[in-house]
Amino acid sequence: MPRRYCIIGAGYTGLAVAKAYTDLGLDYDQVEATDAIGGNWSHGVYDSTYLISSKSVTEYPDYPMPAAYPDFPSAAQMREYLRSFAREFGLERRIEFGALVTRVAPLDDSGLAGWRVEFADGDVREYAGVVVANGHYWDVNVPAYPGEFSGRQIHSKNYKRPADLAGPRVLVVGAGNSGCDLAVEAALTFGNSEISLRRSYWFIPKYVFGIPSGAFDRGSVPVPKVLQEAVFRAIVALGMGRFGSFGLEKPKHRIFDQDLVVNQQLPYFLKHGRITVRPEIDRFEGHTVHFTDGSSCEYDTIVWATGFKTTFPFLRDGLLTWENGQPRLIAHTFAPGLANLHFAGLVAPRSGAGRLLMNSSRLLAEAAMLQSRMGTPVGDLYGHVAKPSSEILAGGPELRWEMLRGTWLVRMMARSKTVRSLASRTLSATAPSPRVVALADQSDPQFDCQRTGVLS
């Protein structure tokens, strides 16, 4: 089979992967289910969306955002930036739009023989490997409560502008980044709004001493998590002070155990009485919502800002191992026991992901090249230094260290003697079938560290 790959998705992550594959001369098809570049930025955000990470940590390192862009660009600016990036590097002409993938399956037990990809229009293709970069902010999560609400309901992904609200009585459920934005937007539109919180949140200001707060998560040295937490708790203390003064409970969980909320407007509107905090919903009764504290109120619209489920409907059950709603992967990329199936962007960094995406995409491309010379999944060898995990939240310093370590490992394995040694150990430990292919005897110059460069 020709060494041709399939990249699923043409959003922020998929474009970074396509650029890395192009740079290393790997042949690929990039398929996008929708009609536009940008993924969630084109089809999943509201008109008033702005980045919560500054442009300096969101931009791709080899294609800076325009100097005229503000520190926190708008959704429209982000869309134009991604389109411009695709044009600049000739990626746009390689994208097939309206190509919905319905099934991805290995040609053998491990994927070493390649993968079959089926499309909604009946087309079937075979590839050496597949990169899953379709994002994890598309399959909406809407919790169920007893009773029935007879007003309008809309998920934050489907909300675009205030005209989508059957106001003026609006209840936003969930106080993540979208929930805070939409509660503020409803308050600006109708004079006030209410927000239902099932749990408390850590609110991070966008600026600290005039510096975007994401800059405090940019270190290249792996800092102990306890020190990182101390830094961000100090940031919260400077930006929020005492939670009780805003009518909020202090979070009971550790600051990095769940997504951080980068928002200063919600506390501001709480202080001005424009937004009211409600506890978790207990049940519905027509337009009336009953809460767990015994209170109730009537609403015209409920906005579900309750997040998303991570799903891959084109992968059969049993192909991945799941835990807490997330697949167990090695370095957020490799599925144990499978070759030539890579996941890109399945991580939620605390700061911008531009440099991380480019570096991880380069690592992924080099791993694909290495895999073509090996008879055992690269991810399983990688698993000797990074155990499978379902954890999706991560900080900048540990992700950068993970990329550096992974790049060193892949390039070391690319030297045939090392590869043969490591592969033979793994193969003997796992007792593979006799179909294992022989490894190359000579080093491939494409993997020379001086020629491919190092991560920065």
Image (cartoon, rainbow, N blue to C red):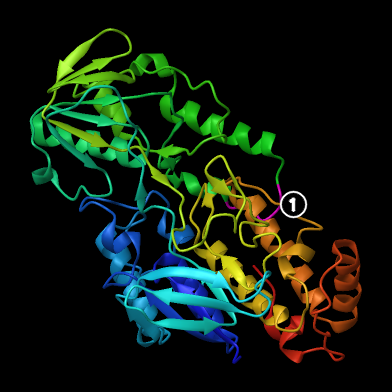
Q: Position of residue 357 (x, y in %)?
A: 53, 65
Q: Position of residue 243 (x, y in %)?
A: 42, 19
Asked if residue 69 shows in the view, the reply is: no
Question: Farthest residue toward the top?
Answer: 294
Q: Is residue 398 above or below residue 301?
A: below
Magenta run includes residue 211 = no
Magenta run includes residue 220 = yes
Q: Is residue 101 left or right of residue 431?
A: left
Choose between 173 and 70: the one closer to the eye. Answer: 173
Q: Is residue 225 above or below residue 234?
A: below
Magenta segment boundaries in residue numbering:
218-222
Q: Quadrant of residue 454?
A: bottom right
Choose between 379 and 252: the one closer to the eye. Answer: 379
Identify residue for label 1.
387
Q: Position of residue 48 (x, y in %)?
A: 22, 50
Numbered disc 1: secondary structure: loop
Q: Is residue 455 above or below residue 93?
A: above
Characterize the magenta stretch by its predominant secondary structure.
loop
Quadrant showing the C terminus:
bottom right
Q: Quadrant of residue 102?
A: bottom left
Residue for point 79% across, 80% down: 435
Residue for point 76% across, 63% down: 380
